[in-house]
Image: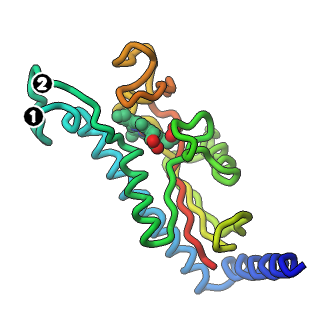
Amino acid sequence: MKDAIRRTGLIFAFAALSLCFTRDGLAQTEIYDYERMASAIVNMLNAATDYIADNFEVINTNNARVGEPLPKGELHSYKGINPEGFAGLVGKQFARKTGISVKFVSNDKPRSSQNKADKWESKQLKKFSKIQYPKGVGYGEVVLVNGKEPYDIAYRYIYPLYIEHKCLKCHGDPARSPTGDGRDITGFEMEDFKEGELSGAISLVFPIE
Ligand code: HEC
């Protein structure tokens, strides 16, 4: 019963907040602040994944150095650092310090079960995949959180990720598997994504109260 009253109270608070966000100038700026912060975090995470993807061969080749041609005849071995795995770890550390959660997600068959999109993320991913949705535009909104989180209202932001040429060596055609078994160098099955295709998204949750 107590829970039901609390829940009803929250729904009212949420409705009031949503009203404020459309009518009140201050709350609008607050939303704008969240959006700006979200966009900055996404940019930083993209820079991290790009750096690892661009330097993947350097990281995994003996005696290789950033910015120099790969040394010939050196051994190549995967050290366990991959673009989204690395950015995901940075995100986890960031979440511990700030409370803002960061996730790389995908709708169908994510590589890691913790990357599976939840209901909200899945809905946005479907929107992103529509032909008329503008490319590279994130989406954010204030939501009522239904779950076991220690907060009830949050700002959620999601940013679409598309396959670029450099992603193909891991997420591309399984026939080009470096190990000849349809897997990429990190040991995951290659998804056969094509350049320009939506592969997933970065999803952020900012707890409000
Ligand atoms: C060196 C291999 C490699 C490259 C290059 C690479 N990825 Fe990944 N990607 C991975 C691995 C491994 C995972 C699973 C990481 C984890 O354990 O969470 C992953 C996970 C993902 C996910 C999360 C969904 C899922 O399936 O788990 C997305 C989205 C993604 N990659 C997009 C991209 C994009 C876009 C690029 C290019 C800009 C890219 N990747 C480049 C290896 C790679």
| Label 1 CB less than 8 angstroms from ligand 1 | no
- Rendered residue at 39%/16% (across/down): 176
Task: Name the kind of residue labelled 2 in the image.
Answer: Glu
**Residue 74: image tag:** 2
Mark 2 residue crowding within 10 angstroms, few (<14) / some (14–19) / many (20+)? few
Q: Relative to 200, say whether 61 is above or below.
A: above
Callout 1 amino acid:
Asn
Number of disc labels: 2
In depth, the one of 202 and 73 nearer the eye is: 73
Q: Which quadrant of the structure image shows residue 183?
A: top left
Q: Position of residue 175 (x, y in %)?
A: 43, 13
Quadrant of picture, ligand 1: top left
Rendered view: 34 above or below 191: below
Local SS, label 2? loop
Vertical placement of 72 versus 107: above or below? above
The vertical placement of 70 against 15, above or below, is above
Q: Quadrant of residue 146?
A: bottom right
Q: Earlier in the sequence, mark 1 or mark 2?
A: 1
Left or right for 46, reference 14 = left
